[in-house]
Amino acid sequence: MTASLATSQAPAGRRRSTRRRLGPVGTSVLGAVIGLAFLIPLWWTVVNSLRPGDETFRYLNPLEWRTFFTLTPTLDNYFALLDTDLGRAILNSLFISLVTVVVGLVICATAAYGLSAFKFRGQGLVFSVIILSFLIPFDAIAIPLADMFRDWNLQNTFFGLILPGLGNGMAIFLLRTFFLAIPEELVEAARLDGLGPWGVFRRIYLPLSVPALIGAGLMLFLFQWQAYVWPLLMGTDRDHVVGPVALSNLQGQFAVDYGVLFAASVILILIPLAIIIGFQRYFIQSVSTTGLK
Amino acid sequence: MTTPTTRAGADPRARRAVRPAPPARPTRRGRRHPALIALAFLAPALIALLVLRLAPAAVALWDSLFRTSLLGGTQFVALGNYFELFGNPDFQNALLVTLVFTILINPLQVATAFLLAVLYTRKAAGSKIWRSLVILPIAVPPAVSAVIWSVIYRPDGLANAFLDLLGLPAQPFLTSPQQALASIMVLLSWIGVGYWMMFLIAGINDIPRSYYEAASLDGASAWRQLWTITFPLVRRPLAFVLVADTVSNLLVFAPVQILTKGGPEGSTNLLMYDIFTRAYTLGDLNTAQAEVVILVLITLVIVALQFRLLRSED
């Protein structure tokens, strides 16, 4: 029935398709135009970071080739960055993110192991606590949490900035999915060889789960690197301010050196970009696991 | 040639060594107190999640039922703060702005991500390169995106330079009550669309090629194949993307705080920013907590809806 319908409609469909369908060339051109449109803001940022701040708006009226290219690139803005609070802020961001990845991975991987390698009563309850914890978005509860941290005197401390990033329900979920796929026989063999629960975790689970660990590490890293609300509430003095907050403070000032502003933006983008590109495969894998399962 | 044989040889031997044992021994070792051992592994994460995620939500709920007066007394007011909020014109405006924002940005971003995913999974020259250019901005933190676009949107900035090239008059963008919200949507989509597109590309790549070949033989046009094959088969990732995108857009804060401070004329006063100003500029923490509870509830309802939708499909 459907087949005959389809064949009877075929000629009309074909005629329509020749009119509507984009050929391979059309597809390429459209894809290229859209891709380049997405690139423009980033490209313009990079070019502006390579020329003096007073030239930022020089070639915009009208647009010309020099808007997007410079023949005399200079790294002066990047060197100037070293003397400002922004340089310090970017180092703070880096420190916070790296500590979060290392400590957070330990906490999340042990939790995932506890959830997947054992069967015990109350497991369902524990699992639902973890699910619920990532259904409540962190930014939404940042203000009540900041109020709690003020009572505990954790304001303006790296401890206070790092702490909320450590327990990540999504990362635990990702690692658990991966751990569940580890063959039972392997674990039994390790037990027979005399490994205790910790030994099984360290010698069997961790080495077999490197891709998932990298994926989870990326999640923990990006959570901290992109954070804005929490550091705005927590790290308010210049020793604890993080990159994005320092950058937005600079933007709000009266006289802005746009060259330095763009140089800081480039660094704040380049670091996560390099990490994502370096671990692209694991990133996509973690994205699809958390999204589709 | 040698590796496969040695592997094939090694594998069964290992299995033979393992197989006979399980029935006898594991009951003796390491399984006496599985709950205690498991909880020991789970403890750090559970404490972190309970204290840093669930407790603040509970605190917000509890605090929202009280009111602290200027004299220092704290008084139980039950749902008083909620009634006050819903009667407050600023909050009503924030709800309305958030609603308009949600209704516009989510379908737009998801539709764009879907169409781009379709475009970039077609066989065409350079498709992978152009695709990665769209994905590139996902590395940009929202606050950095806001700062970059603040320069682009300046009256003498890049956006107006492009309008001039097209022969269009200069626009005020962030300083216009009619354009500010749309301007924020653009900079959020710049960093968001590529991210959501990745999920949909993964979904499209899972569809067997043979479906399209069969459809082509039957003479179905590309347009028809898109709606009868691609669209129904990526429904699951699409539903996920729509919900995850909606939740993340409910939490938009950095661009508003950096670019517009909720203005002009309250036109970009999204819920997250309204909570922030209520708590810190107005110093009314109890009412702000009530607003936090409302935001968390909205999020949970949206996510629950997703589970409903996905389950009924199975």
Image (spheres, coloured by chain):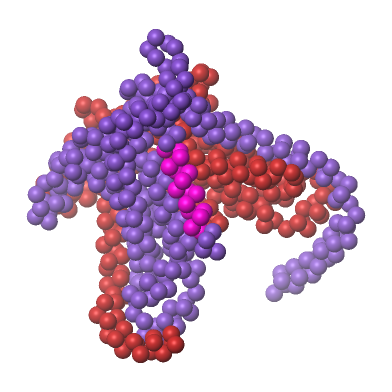
Chain colours: A red, B purple
Relative horizontal placement of residue B16, taking residue A198 as reference (left or right): right
Can residue B67 be seen by looking at this rendering?
Answer: yes
Q: Which residues are magenta?
A: B295-310
- Residue at horizontal 36 percent and vertical 40 percent from the top: B252
Q: What is the number of callouts on the image?
A: 0
Task: Report which quarter residue B143 is drawn in.
Answer: top left
Task: Please state the horizontal and vertical placement of residue B306, each as a whole percent of the image.
Answer: 48, 53
Q: Nearer the viewer, residue B271 or B124?
A: B271
Residue positioned 35% across, 52% down in the render: B106
A140 and A189: which is toward the camera: A140
Residue B130: give x, y in percent of width and height.
Answer: 34, 62
Dominant SS in magenta: helix
Residue A262, x across and y down, in percent: 29, 39
Residue furthest toward the top?
B71
| Most foreground residue, A57 or A227 | A227
Which residue is depicted at the point 20% across and 34% down?
A: B265
Residue B122 location (% of width, % of height) = 38, 71
- Up-down relation of residue A183 to residue A230 (above or below): below
The answer to which quarter of the image holds residue B146 is: top left
Query: Could you tell me if residue A209 is visible in this image?
Result: no
Q: Nearer the viewer, residue B27 or B239?
A: B239
> Which quarter of the figure is the C terminus of chain A placed in?
bottom right
Image quarter hosting the N terminus of chain A: bottom left
Residue at figure coordinates x 31%, y 65% from the top left: A31
Residue A142 to residue B307: above or below: above
Left or right of B152: which side holds A212?
right
Give yes or no for residue B309 being in the magenta stretch.
Answer: yes
A28 on left or right of B296: left
> Is residue A94 located in the magenta-colored stretch of the structure?
no
Residue B87 position by quadrant: top left
A226 w.r.t. A287: above or below: above
